[in-house]
Amino acid sequence: MSNAELSSTDPFEAAQAAAAYIAEQTGVASHDVALVLGSGWGEAAELIGETTATLTASEVPGFHAPAVEGHVGTIRSVLTKEGKRALVLGARTHYYEGKGVRAVVHGVRTAAAAGCKTFVVTNGCGGLNENWTPGTPVLISDHINLTAASPLEGATFVDLTDLYSPRIRALAREVDPSLEEGVYAQFTGPHYETPAEVQYAKRIGAELVGMSTALESIAARHAGMEVFGISLVTNLAAGISPVPLSHQEVIEAGQAAGKRISKLLADIIAKL
């Protein structure tokens, strides 16, 4: 399914078609939890259980190959050690790619159509708290959507109170009591925020800034899934960092923290 076809097709029918394809190709009729693994989080897929099927994302209806270095282009079915089925979505579409909001949240809706009741979203982001050095994992307690877009269409009213599950955040703190939490602001990108924009985000309550997550989480709540979000601070944000920002810095911070944060996420998943 091309981007034009996805835009012109009912998004929920498109998700059903993708879920049916995944079920047929993996031999798994229904999954329990979906994971979107952002920069730095990729190793978690290996730790949560046994991968029983790997699909090339671009072959799944409505999905695209990733446009960002550091993201894999696969969709994996994983049997967890606790006997649950995890759908690992390694082909995230970012809003700045210009494919439209439907494409951004197609993976989320596909996961819901595939039976997932829990949606785990991760990212690499800029930190506004100087105490959160690169490599610090931070639970997402809430978000600010600065994209001026929504995945919901028409008169679709969804309560976003406690969007990021307090229950799962409490489970995360059982794994690591030192985990802190913060509010994530999604900008459109692909450029990094200016120092003035970072200060604006800080004044309206953000402590983390990035280019993903909020739109996906809204779609997940609308689909009835319980949402858990966790960020990896890969750099201090513009105007706070003493050095210019770069995507290479994001990748290097993710690689340095990868094993530690992936084990943390795997341990949290085991408690779901």
Image (spheres, rainbow, N blue to C red):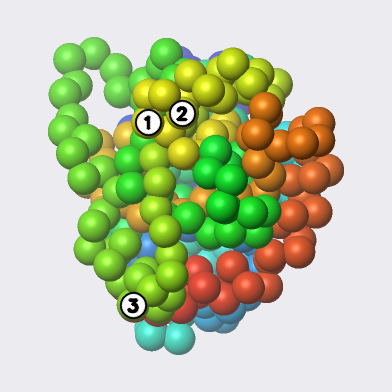
Nearer to me, 121 or 128: 128
Residue 191 falls in image quadrant: top right
Q: Please give the name of the residue rendered at 31% of the width and 62% of the height, measured from the top-left corner.
A: 169
Q: Earlier in the sequence, mark 3 or mark 1?
A: 3
As drawn, is 123 to the left or to the right of 34?
right
Is there CB contact under 8 Å for labels 3 and 1? no
Q: Which mark is residue 205?
A: 1
Q: Earlier in the sequence, mark 3 or mark 2?
A: 3
Is there CB contact under 8 Å for labels 2 and 1? yes
Residue 28 lies, in percent from the top left, at: 43, 68
Estimate the spatial distance between the alpha carbons at disc 3 and disc 2, rounded to whole Å.
29 Å
Residue 43 to residue 251: above or below: below
Could one spot residue 88 in this view of the protein?
Answer: yes
Q: Considering the numbered disc 3 on the image, is that residue within a helix, a strand or a loop?
A: helix
Q: Which mark is residue 174?
A: 3
Which residue is denoted by mark 2 in the rendering? 202
Q: Please give the name of the residue rendered at 42% of the width and 13% of the height, measured from the top-left corner.
A: 148
Please tell me whether mark 3 or mark 2 is closer to you in this view.
2
Residue 267 to residue 156: above or below: below
Label 2: few (<14), some or many (≥20) within 10 Å?
some
Nearer to me, 239 or 16: 239
Could one spot residue 214 in this view of the protein?
Answer: no
Quadrant of image for the C terminus: bottom left
Estimate the spatial distance between the alpha carbons at disc 2 and disc 1, rounded to whole Å.
5 Å
Quadrant of image for the N terminus: top right
Is there CB contact under 8 Å for labels 3 and 2? no
As drawn, is 222 to the left or to the right of 38?
left
Residue 90 to residue 51: above or below: above
